[in-house]
Amino acid sequence: MNFEMIAKTFQGLEEVLAQELTNLGANDIEIGRRMVSFTGDKEMMYKANFNLRTAIRILKPIKHFTAKDADEVYNQIKAIAWEDYLDVNKSFAVDAVVYSDEFRHSKFVSYKVKDAIVDYFREKTDKRPSVRINRPDMQIHIHIAQTKCTLALDSSGESLHRRGYRQEATEAPLNEVLAAGMIMLAGWNGQCDLIDPMCGSGTIPIEAALIARNIAPGVFRKEFAFEKWSDFDADLFDNIYNDDSAEREFEHKIYGYDNSSKACEIATHNIKAAGVSKDVILKQQPFQHFEQPKENALLITNPPYGERITSDDLLGLYQMIGERLKHAFTGNTAWVLSYRDECFDQIALKATEKIPLYNGALECQFRKYELFGGKYKEHKALEAHETVEPNEETK
């Protein structure tokens, strides 16, 4: 039986997530803001949690309604046949997201939802389910936009970016969902070498290795919330978990560099935990020493920005990035995620694409640089000539 689901993501990754859902075989896919809605059966819900790289969580809506005040929310929630979803002896928690003039406080809304559920059971059974913030048996999510309310069950539990392979993190590590999204936006799926010259705790190289071999990100997770649901089908989920038929060979290499020995040590642990040591070559090396790779490669990196280092150091770093790309990466393509225009200005190269992405609360940009040998105009002229007349000389 098919039902409605919502996959949450970061702003800027909605299109990538929609494509992932299409590849997974989901139906009725519709892109929203920081989310993609779709329909599917229980197997699709399990697969979405297990396979999607750019989803943060998968919600299963159980009721849509309108409410102008907290009492209406209470009455609507209390009218649900809660024994269909929750055992009175189990625990639950409520998470509220509110964008509304009528409802000012998400905490107040979550209290109302909680009261309605507890009162429902108390009146029916003289017993009440317990409310537990950490690791509840059922996580309930309410979203209110003005007066439109959606009540949903959270099938993921802990955010899906917490893959389970991260042993340790450097300061301000890149979110795994964002890293996977960047790699997919760059169009890389293992067709050449990939380089991250400032890899920190190794998130981009690890996510790249999982993409290259098509290893599901859910394989490292200890638990998904749906495993505690009363209708959990263990055999169905085992089949999904143990199916590695889509995994593939990877002929190239992924290189991660960082100038910090501590970062390299942490990255080594994480790469090992993710089981991708044979695909990722890690080396302590500052970007200043970056040299032209022997093989064709794609570079994706997330240099420090924002409040992490002083502005003079920051501008110097970005000047050096531009200089290295220009002199040691010709004939290849680089993608850089950063925050401020003045940082990008220091790179002093013309970006051929600019994609807005959020890293936490920071509105960043993901910029593409195509590093041509010779002058850009000559390259374009040659390219045009080749497409018209592919004779031996122009080859």
Image (cartoon, rainbow, N blue to C red):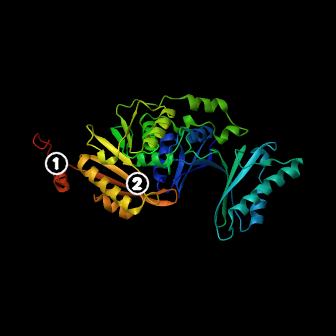
- Find residue 75 and report its image quarter: bottom right
Of circles 2 and 1, the one toward us is 2
Q: Could you tell me residue 254's position as x and y percent?
A: 37, 37
Left or right placement of residue 262 versus residue 369 in this view: right
- Residue that carries the numbered disc 1 in the rendered image: 388
Dot 1 crowding, Cα within 10 Å, few <14, some 14–19, many 20+: few
**Residue 175, visible in the rendered structure:** yes
Q: CA distance from mark 2 to mark 1?
A: 36 Å
In the foreground, 122 or 334? 334
Q: Residue at the spot x=35%, y=51% of the render?
A: 335
**Residue 186, visible in the rendered structure:** no
Q: Could you tell me which quadrant the N terminus lies in? A: top right
Q: Could you tell me residue 284's position as x and y percent?
A: 38, 40
> Looking at numbered disc 2 in the image, what kind of residue is underneath it?
Leu
Secondary structure under tag 1 reads helix
> Looking at numbered disc 1 in the image, what kind of residue is underneath it?
Val
**Residue with the most extreme right position:** 126
